[in-house]
Amino acid sequence: MSLPICVTCGVQYGHDRPDCPICLDERQYVGWDGQRWTDLAGLRAAGHRGRVEDEGPGVVGIGTEPSTGIGQRALLVRTPGGNVLWDMVSHLDEATVRAVRDLGGVRAIAVSHPHFYGSMVEWAHAFDAPIHLHEKDRAWLPRADDAVAFWSGDRFDLGGGLTLINAGVHFAGGQVLHWRDGEDGAGALLSGDIVQVVSDRDWVGFMYSYPNLIPERPRVVRRALGLLEGHDFARVYGGWWRRVVRTDGRAAVRRSAERYLRFALDDDR
């Protein structure tokens, strides 16, 4: 309850420290009022509570009201072989634990990148679930724990038609989750902001740093697009409430990447 949580990014650390390395990195920022800390007890005392709502067929959103960190919500993917929790939030309370258990609990956790690590170890302990992260982001681990399992390579099979893909956008270990059986077999992609669902929700974006407006490198975007080839998905679930491409998601990612590369390379073709 007392381990420090960075107010700006919402990531929980395993011990007291003067700074947040994730916020000092150029992909994030230190809050305008300087480095500030809270903890789970402080979040509860401030009136934060869990928000659990359907986000799509077989997909339940889990967030916090008022929001914490950068405002993202997690997603619980419900499958016959057990539920997988995708991405993470900072807050956790007993009511949220009960609500998730009523939905079948959590057999595994996977987080797209360090900005969304939240209080992932607390969640892992609450549900006795492993956390799957890509080894390329090992240096960003804020709290060491036996629940954390690093994987390597381009793809990792979570079972039940769920596959982690190391897209590498935003962070070298940035990963997305493909659900083969989502959308009645049409497939779904859970992307956080590795593949960012933008405001019109018919397109996506690719950035190295969102707050500091640093675009992702074209070669990285090309690699990500290549890794997604062969994976069908009708929907793309972004990292925030209602940030969802609801139809023709695979085509939306491809045309968005082509548009991005055209502008990035100043290519009028």
Image (spheres, rainbow, N blue to C red):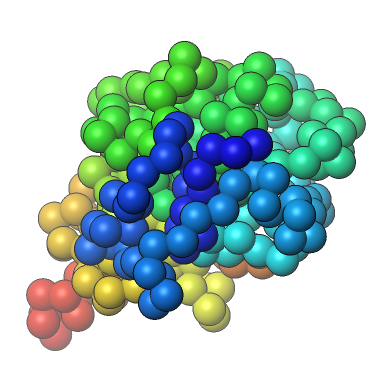
Q: Is residue 16 visible?
A: yes
Residue 5 or residue 91, whichever sits in front: 5
Q: Nearer the viewer, residue 184 or 165?
A: 165
Residue 250 place in picture, x, y as percent = 46, 56
Q: In this view, does 50 lie above or below 139?
A: below
Location of residue 203 with respect to 36 vertically, above or below = below
Image coords of residue 119 (percent x, y): 56, 40
Q: Quadrant of the N terminus?
A: top right
Q: Position of residue 2 (x, y in %)?
A: 60, 38
Residue 172's x, y, as percent? Answer: 24, 43
Q: How many marks?
A: 0
Observer able to see residue 154: no
Question: What residue occupies the far bottom of the structure in this picture?
Answer: 268
Q: In this view, does 220 lie to the left or right of 132?
A: left
Position of 33 with respect to 57 (left or right) is: left
Q: Which residue appears at 50% of the width and 44% of the height?
A: 4
Q: Quadrant of the C terminus?
A: bottom left
Q: Residue at x 30, y 39 (%)?
A: 140
Relative to 121, is 228 above or below? below
Q: In which quarter of the image is residue 81?
A: top right
Name which residue lies at 35% across and 73% down.
Answer: 211
